[in-house]
Image (cartoon, coloured by chain):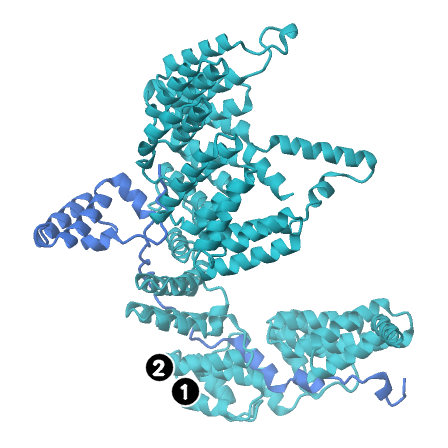
Amino acid sequence: MHSNAFSKPVGDPYAALGLSRQASEADIKRAYFQLVRQFPPERQPEKFRAIRTAYEQLRDPEQRARMDLFLVQPPPPLPKQRRPSYDLSVHVDDLLTLAMELVRTPMQDDLGEIALPSERPDGR
Amino acid sequence: MATKRRQKERRARKYAQQQRHRPAQRVQEAVVAFKRGDVDKALALATSALTAANDAATCAAAQHIVIEAHFRAAATTTDLHARLEHLDTALQRAPDETRLHYHRAITLWGLGRMAEALPELAALQAQPGHRAEVAFLYQLACAVTDRPWSEPSLSVAEANTVRMLQGLMQGTDTSTLLGQIEHATLLGDQPELWQTLLSMKENPKSAPVARLHAIAAGSTPPGARAIVQYYLGVGALRKGDVETAQSAWRMAAEAGMTAVRLTENHQQMLRIQAHALGQEGHWDEVVTLLQTQPATETPDVVLQELLAVAHMHLGYTAAQASDWNTAVRHWQEAVTRSASRQLLQNLALAREALGQWRPAADAWREMLRRRPRKQDHPDALTDPQMAILWHHVAECYERVEEIGEVLTCLKNAVKYAPTDVELRVKLADVSQQLGREEAAEKELERVLAINAQHIPALLRLGALYADRRDRDPLPLWRGVLAVEPQHAEARDALAQFYVEKVREEAPQYGWFDRLRRRSTKEKIALLQEGLRELPDHPLLLIEMGELYATMKKIKEARASFVQAWEAAPQKPSVVAAAIHSLLHAGGGDVVTRLLPTVRQIPGLLAMFWVDLMRQILQCKLGQEWAEVFGEEAISLAEQGQHGETRAYVLVQLFEAANNAKAPEVAARYAARIRAEHPHSGGVEFTEAYQAHQRHDSSRALRLLQQAQRLARQANETGIATLAEQVAGLLQTPARSLFDLLAPPGGRGKRRGRNLVDELLDELDEEDRGAFQRFF
């Protein structure tokens, strides 16, 4: 067993065949034959080789599962949005706090001073 | 003079250090830190001074700083819980300080803990000369907690406000209240404030944005302004004006409002915005939006998920453009917010693409750790997949030579693929590499239990048995040959085993025959048995030839050597052994006849001939042969294959001749180097050798350095490397080995010598030569 150690992530065979990651075996076969008709080996050997390689990697489910472990995975879709629910009511406790805030002394006004013993008036 | 100055400086430093540790000094430093605004440092210094101080003045000063520092910290934070904590700590040190009680009551009020604020306010109210607002706050607290309250101490505006808020708390209809306050004086500089908010409460669709804007812009205290800003946001959103709402809520948060609904509303708004941007594929904008909002600092699962998805998309786009650094940055961000297996897989692959094998292995391991455990989960990994991944992680660790981790990962892989023999063989190899031979042996035996004909396992186990000498390796090598009769490694191992048996001096027939060697006849019989099993094996044939030679059966000896040569004419080790032995047996004519076949060996190195020349000179088999082989080496070097230059080969021949104690041959090569390759560094190399022989090591070293420099200039990498290696050996102190081995004391010295002797015995011939040559 070989773990498929790559120095760089491998080319994506799904992309080569124009398939999604969820493609079925039938989808893979269909896409392959369609592309082979489009790029026959005698006319476009390079392209055909790429298609063939991709197909070889995906045709066997076991090899495909192994391949999937070493492919960069596409990001997940956007999570479904829940119905927005704002709280747009006026709350009594906010009004209570407002009343308190209107009269209270800010803490900044109550800050004390600290002096070095030598700076104190009593000289201590 | 200088010494005195240094002593003085040292004393001054020590004094300063002692001073620093004095509580009074710490208090001084705390005051300085406090004045600089470094409240944390002031607090730490004052607290430590407080515990260490033993005079009342220092204690009082430190106490004062601690209280003030806590108060200042409470005033700075917008987190009401943290503020309360600071105030409580300060109160433990100054339980009678009124301002601490006052602000504690206010903080509790802000936290909605009115029942706890009430006793604080009651106590403050009872104190003579209390703050003007205390009466109002106390009466309001009583009113809204269903306690009796009294009007006389309050102004008209204060009393009206208490009445209105009490009504609200008691559930009085808002429209009634609005009617009551229509012409009443209420608290605050802006008469429309309460009316606006009450009308918003009365009518959920009311959105007096302009009025709230005006109120917020007026002269309202910051805490009150935060609430007005919040309701400005509420009003804006009631009208569908998201932008105004967002900006108002941001301002409310900045002004210190920490109400849950503000955070939740803000988060809700961000979710909608981020979702809309994500749907349009503007992932970078999603990241910008969510990372710059204070609301995302709180753990909102939905926002964190959106941010993770945005980073995943950005990472994927970067990966598709092979920008792996950017991909790693985004995926790393996403990993902190999402537990997705695929994400970690991507991160591991990106790390691999950057050649960061250790972080890649860590990412793979994290991926395996986070995998879904339920087998029916769509992302669940099958056992073969698990084995593949663990094997892959092992390979990542292998690249950074973390063999211990390789072993752990392979063991994990084997758990998921217990019948995978290749994996088990690898596990055995790694175990052996770590010196765990018994574990390796057991692993290989397990492989053979699965597949008794597994050749790599048979070979490895055979080698292990042969090394350990506790089990018989023959059945294993024979097992390989039963599957693959021409398997070279097994044949060689088996042949070597016969040869070792022939050379064996171990007791055979009990105590009295302890020193008995095998007779020549017995040895020949053993080799014949070997040749029946391994027909024409060159190793056995050479050994047979050697035996005949010792019996003075020269004809048979030569026949065996020739047979060995012809059995493996392309194998340099066999050919070299055959030539050497033939020359010992006077078979120079045969060597001359077969020499052209040696030149046909593909990929033969000039060093083959150099080594042969060294052996011939060491055995004193004739200088003419030494010269023949030397010329063969030079002509092979002239073909310019394998990077062996002519100058390099001449230097090697010089060194080999010296090594074989043939100074006249060495001198001839030295002269040729001087004449034919004067600027190759070879001349300096030969002179260094001569200087070393005269025990002038420093000159030898100098010349070797010169040789390296010149060789590099002349592109003679072989000579440069050789000179570097020899210089390295020369620079190693000759006595260091003794120093290392000999423990102190007379007996120790003797033991040291014995150990050196043992060490020399263990070195093979070539290493021993090198060792003795340089030390």
- The answer to whether the residues at label 1 and label 2 have Cβ atoms under 8 Å apart is yes
Q: Position of residue B337 (x, y in %)?
A: 45, 60
Quadrant including the N terminus of chain B: bottom right
Q: Position of residue B671 (x, y in %)?
A: 49, 50
SS for tag 2? loop
**Chain letter of the residue carrying label 2:** B
Question: Vertical placement of B105 versus B324: above or below?
Answer: below
Instruction: Specify few, some or many for label 1: CA neighbours under 10 Å numbering under 14, 14-19, or 20 or more.
Output: many
Q: Residue at x 69, y 42 (%)?
A: B737
Locate residue B135: give its quadrant.
Answer: bottom right
User: Viewed as shown, does residue B272 lie left or right of B724?
Assistant: left
Label 1 and label 2: CA atoms lie apart by 9 Å
Q: Amino acid at mark 1?
A: Val
**In which quarter of the view is residue B601 placed?**
top left
Residue topped by disc 1: B209
Q: Which chain is cyan?
A: B
Seen from the viewer's position, the closer of residues A82 and B309 is B309
Task: Check the image and name the residue furthest to the right.
Answer: B55
Q: Residues within 10 Å of mark 2 (few under 14, many from 20)?
A: some
* Number of disc labels: 2
Q: Position of residue B171 (x, y in %)?
A: 51, 74
Which chain does the residue under circle 1 lie in? B
Please tell me if label 1 and label 2 are on a single chain. Answer: yes
Chain A colour in the picture? blue
Which residue was labeled with disc 2? B239
Does B473 sit above or below residue B368?
A: above
Q: Is residue A24 visible?
A: yes
- Disc 2 residue type (three-letter): Lys
Q: Which residue shows up at 45% across the image and 25% down it?
A: B581
How far across and how far down the image is residue A70, in percent?
34, 49
Can residue B447 be seen? no
